[in-house]
């Protein structure tokens, strides 16, 4: 199972002591890309437990969909006779 995740950051997120909540205990970094508290884990990965191996998923507005095919910009241009589709 894989998932497409859209991130807009262009640099690292530096953590400082104010990012740590002593009441919550351990700090976990999100690795599924679904956390509303990104870069911190909020438990959203639980939604991925029934994802099938060998498929790629995308989550939009809380809904999961299977990705049939990823098309790169270059492939899209090739399919459209060199013209870019917007």
Image: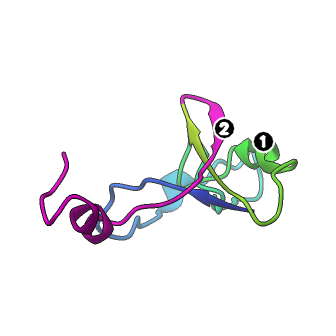
Q: Position of residue 8 (x, y in %)?
A: 33, 55
Q: Are marks 2 and 1 in contact (CB under 8 Å)?
A: yes
In front of the other: 52 or 26: 52
Which residue is painted at 81% across and 45% down in the image? 46
Q: Which residue is mark 1?
A: 47
Residue extending farthest left: 83
Reading the chain from its start, which is encountered first: label 2 or label 1?
A: 1
The one of 73 and 81 positioned closer to us in this rendering = 81
Looking at the image, is 6 positioned above or below residue 29? Answer: above
Q: Quadrant of the N terminus?
A: bottom right
Locate residue 28, reporting x and y percent. 70, 60
Image height of 61 relative to 36, above or below: above
Mark 2 residue element = strand
The image shows residue 13 at horizontal and vertical percentages of 40, 64
Left of 48 or right of it: where is 86? left
Residue 82 is inside the magenta segment: yes
Q: Residues within 10 Å of mark 2 (few under 14, many from 20)?
A: some
21 part of magenta stretch? no
Look at the numbered disc 1 and give the secondary structure of its residue.
Answer: helix
Q: Which dot marks residue 77?
A: none
Name which residue lies at 32% across and 68% down.
75
* Left or right: 75 in relation to 69: left
x, y percent for residue 61: 54, 28
Range of magenta residues: 61-86
> Label for residue 64?
2
Determine the CA span between mark 2 and mark 1: 9 Å
In this rendering, the label closer to the viewer, 2 or 1: 2
- As drawn, the residue found furthest toward the right would be 50
Residue at image position (47%, 62%) is 16
Report whether 26 appears left or right of 4: right
Q: Quadrant of residue 27?
A: bottom right
Res 71 quadrant in image: bottom left
């Amino acid at each position: 199972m894989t998932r497409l995740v859209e991130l807009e950051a262009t640099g690292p997120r530096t953590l400082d002591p104010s990012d740590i909540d002593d009441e919550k205990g351990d700090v976990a970094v999100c690795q599924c890309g679904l956390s509303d508290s990104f870069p911190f884990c909020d438990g959203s990965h639980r939604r991925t437990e029934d994802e099938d191996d060998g498929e790629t998923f995308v989550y939009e507005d809380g809904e999961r969909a299977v990705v049939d095919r990823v098309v790169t910009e270059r492939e899209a241009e090739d399919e459209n006779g060199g013209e870019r589709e917007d």
